[in-house]
Amino acid sequence: MAARKPVVLNSGSYQQLQAGDYLDAPQSGGDVVVLLNGDVSPVVIGAPGYINAADSFLKAKADASGTEKVRGLVAVSPSISNGVTGSVMVSGVLTATTTQWDAVVESGAGGLVAGTDYFLSPTTAGKITATAPSTVGQLVTRVGTALSTTELMIDIQPPILL
């Protein structure tokens, strides 16, 4: 396959990218997969999910083996309806409004807290918490770190059984 130079817009005219020039474009988001919402209700942006069947996910929860294996966070605003496919972010920075994060973070108010690690909730499916589970039988699954009140850097770690 031949190497081709991209076409760019320069002062209102199209031209090939010139030697020594480079493309300068903002980077955002992260790696996503498209999965079917197998849950009985819509799943909101930021909610953690686990794979329950081929190309399908359910809301994750850290209280039982099998539901704690977070594979990603819903990346569709405001939600993915049940029985519908949508993007689930598996790595990168997920951005949502403070109100949207409040719907996903247990005891959340005002969005995320910058620098705070977030974990899968052991009490409510599809929620995250700033407090790691500590009860024997629960599973600690770190999902990421807040960069700001609206951005979570997804860094899903394998679950640890307590």
Image (cartoon, grey):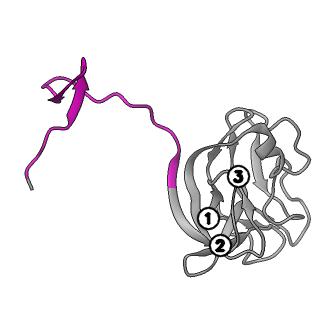
| Residue sitting at x 62%, y 65% | 71
Q: Nearer the viewer, residue 120 or 55?
A: 55
Relative to residue 94, is residue 68 drawn left or right?
right
Residue 96 position within the rendered picture, expressed as x and y whole percent measured from the top left? 69, 42
The answer to whether mark 3 and mark 2 are in CB contact below 8 A is: no
Q: Which amino acid type is marked by label 2? A: Phe
Magenta residues span 2-31
User: Dominant secondary structure of the magenta stretch?
Assistant: loop
Q: Residues within 10 Å of mark 3 (few under 14, many from 20)?
A: some
Residue 32 position within the rendered picture, expressed as x and y whole percent measured from the top left? 52, 57
| Residue sitting at x 14%, y 25% | 18
State whether residue 96 is above or below residue 132: above
Q: Residues within 10 Å of mark 2 (few under 14, many from 20)?
A: many
Residue 161 position within the rendered picture, expressed as x and y whole percent measured from the top left? 78, 69
The answer to whether mark 1 and mark 2 are in CB contact below 8 A is: yes
- Give the numbered dot on residue 71: 1
Q: For residue 27: magenta?
A: yes
Spatial CA distance of label 3 from label 2 is 17 Å
Secondary structure at numbered mark 2:
strand
